[in-house]
Each structure stands twice: as structure tokens, then as C-alpha cells.
Amino acid sequence: MRREWPLEEGIMLGMPEGPSVRKFHHLVSPFVGQQVVKTGGSSKKLHPAELQSLWLQDTQVHGKKLFLRFDPDEETRPPGNHPLSEPLREGASKEEATGPTQTLASIGPELSEQSVRFPELVLHGEGSSDDLGRDTPAGEAERWLHVSFGLFGSIWVNEFSRAKKANKRGDWRDPVPRLVLHFGGGGFLAFYNCQMSWSSSPEVKPSSDILSEKFHRGQALEALGQAQPVCYTLLDQRYFSGLGNIIKNEALYRAGVHPLSPGSLLSPSSLESLVDHVVAFSTDWLQGKFQGKQQHTQVYQKEQCPVGHQVKKDTFGPPGRFQRLTWWCPQCQPRLPAEEPEQLQP
């Protein structure tokens, strides 16, 4: 059986970005309202058995983070309370006959931009950040499991990941999931390469989420206008939550902005264009996922840009912090100020 979302396999070399995590959220949503009847997984910190008999009551997504709420008691919630549950549940009967991949593909064309970029619920609670790292569920009625996908994290539905090649010892060993949750409805979720911890409430801030309809353009534009390379600011999750290296490279190229150009030297129209391309590329990427389409890049991991110019590649990042690979076209993306020679670091 093939993977649920093969769309980034050839291009994703880093942490899953906002569109991928939104897809994970969409896959988890049909299980809301169901009880965990069996658990498994290799996690030592989380202790999978502690989720036994809990009910998955809600899910929230913010940027690259996924939050799952578990509760020891079944809760009566109004029909359609969850924005993504009902469309997926309508396809549940088909899943047994056609498999999860076909079921997801069948609902994709019906999703509009508004149904993909849905509003989130902002929740508040004491210790939302301090509580991260607990290895047991919180004592409050609401228990939120914070899932971070690291570099290669993923979620599989009703199937397990299989080895695609032999390891260095020549063994064909399938990846071991960190957590497996079997639900009363008959399906299961398998979490791979994830870091998971308990929190009393999810850290959700729609104004910074590039895939939220509440994304605050003014805040993003103000951040981009700082006197530092725009490629640094774009990866700052305080202002562009969910934006990763692929989106960064593609938005900069499509806006014609050099990654090392200080935002303070860019015109208002250039900054506006850059934000437009961030949102448009991210939304198109997510929409394509639900329609089963491959996401095509114009400069990321390319040798030539669409015009035929030679693409350059190097690592950029704030001094003393993580450096990210960056692809850009020197001709299509002239650096500002123009008289300065191009350098690896400003």
C-alpha cells in the first residue's frame, strides 16, 4: 500500500511545513469523538498505554504544530462542531472498500480555499508553555497532546509505513511508530518521528498562521520591514507560523526578492507582493494535497529558474543560529542595495 501523501517525498528535506501539518490535522479529524481502545508505539517519554480508554475530543492546528485533546469521559458535542469532521466522516464508509488514499482524493475537489483556510479556536490556560514536557496527562479536564513533527515526522491512517530501502546493514526494517492509537470505530493512527508532550492548553495564535483566514498581514509586513535579510524574517514563526524552507524559497523567487535583501530597503509594493506569494503558494500547496496533485517548485532544488538562468544555492541564517539552504536566481532576484557585492552573510 502506498503512502497517504507522496506529494513532498521528492522535495521535502526538512520539517513538515504548514500545508503538511494541515493535512495531518485533516487526517486526524474523523477520529474526533471516538475512544482509544488499544495503544502501541516506541515512545518512552509519552507512555502510550496512558492514552488507553481516553476519548479524542478535539484537534487544533497552528503552523507546524498539531494539538489533540483527550478526555477520560465521552463528551456530547453539537453536530458539525468540528470544521473538518463531517466531510471526512461522510467518506468513512467508502474507506473500507477503496482504502484511505482514494477516499481522501474523492473529497479533495470539493474543498474551496475557505474550507481549507478555516478559522481556529484560540484557547488560553495557565502553564501552556511550562507544562510542555510532561510525560503524563495533565490533571485538568482538558488534556492536550502537543505533536511536533521534527524533521521527518508524519501521521499514517489505517496503515503502517514500510521500508523503501535497506539500511546500512542490509536489513529491510520497517520504521517503528512512536505512537499508535486504535479507536472504537475500527481505524487507527500511527505517528512517526514525532515529539509529543502534554499541555494544559494549545498554543494557538491564528494571526501569525499563514494558512489561517485570521492571518494578520499588517503584522507580517511590519516584521518584514526590519533591517535584516528577509529570508531570516520569513522563517520566524512568531510572524509566519507554518512557513518553512520550501515556501520561503518559492515566495522570494516569485516576488523577485533576493533572500539577503534587508526588508528595510524594499518598497512597500515589494513587501506586499512577498506576503501575497507566501499566502498564495501555501494555499495552493494545501489545496493540491486534497486534490492529489504534485506541488511544483520553480526554484527550490532547481539548477535553472523557469526563465533559464543559472540558480545559485547557499546556506543563510542569523549569526549563531540555524542556517538553511537557499536557492535563488541572481538575475530574477537582484540584491539590494545593488552596489554591494553578493556575500554569503550580510
Image (cartoon, helix red, strand yellow):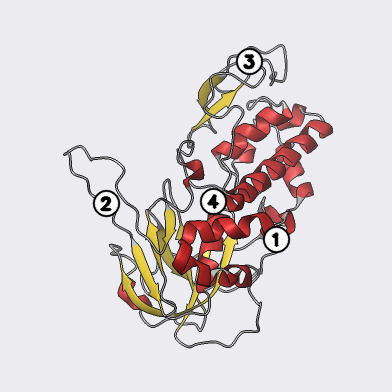
Residue at coordinates 28% horizontally, 40% vertically from top-left?
165
Kindly state the secondary structure of the residue where label 3 is placed. loop
The front one of 236 and 193 is 193
Q: CA distance from mark 4 to mark 2?
A: 22 Å
Q: Report which residue position mark 2 lands on.
A: 174
Q: Report which residue position mark 1 lands on.
A: 115
Residue at coordinates 76% horizontally, 42% vertically from top-left?
221
Q: Report which residue position mark 4 lands on.
A: 20
Label 3 packing within 10 angstroms: few (<14), some (14-19), many (20+) = few
Tell me the quarter of the picture where residue 89 sits. bottom right
Q: CA distance from mark 2 to mark 3?
A: 41 Å
Q: Residue lying furthest front in this view?
A: 97
The three-letter amino acid code for the residue at tag 1 is Ser
The three-letter amino acid code for the residue at tag 2 is Asp
Q: Is residue 321 above or below residue 205?
A: above
| Tag in front: 4 or 2 | 2
The three-letter amino acid code for the residue at tag 4 is Ser
| Tag in front: 1 or 4 | 1
Quarter of the image with the C terminus is top right
Q: Report which residue position mark 3 lands on.
A: 308
Give the mark nearer the N terminus: 1 vs 3.
1
Q: Is residue 114 visible?
A: yes
Give the mark nearer the N terminus: 1 vs 2.
1
Q: CA distance from mark 3 to mark 4?
A: 30 Å
Q: Left or right: 11 with respect to 266?
A: left
Point out residue 157 in the picture as x, y percentages from the top left corner: 43, 62
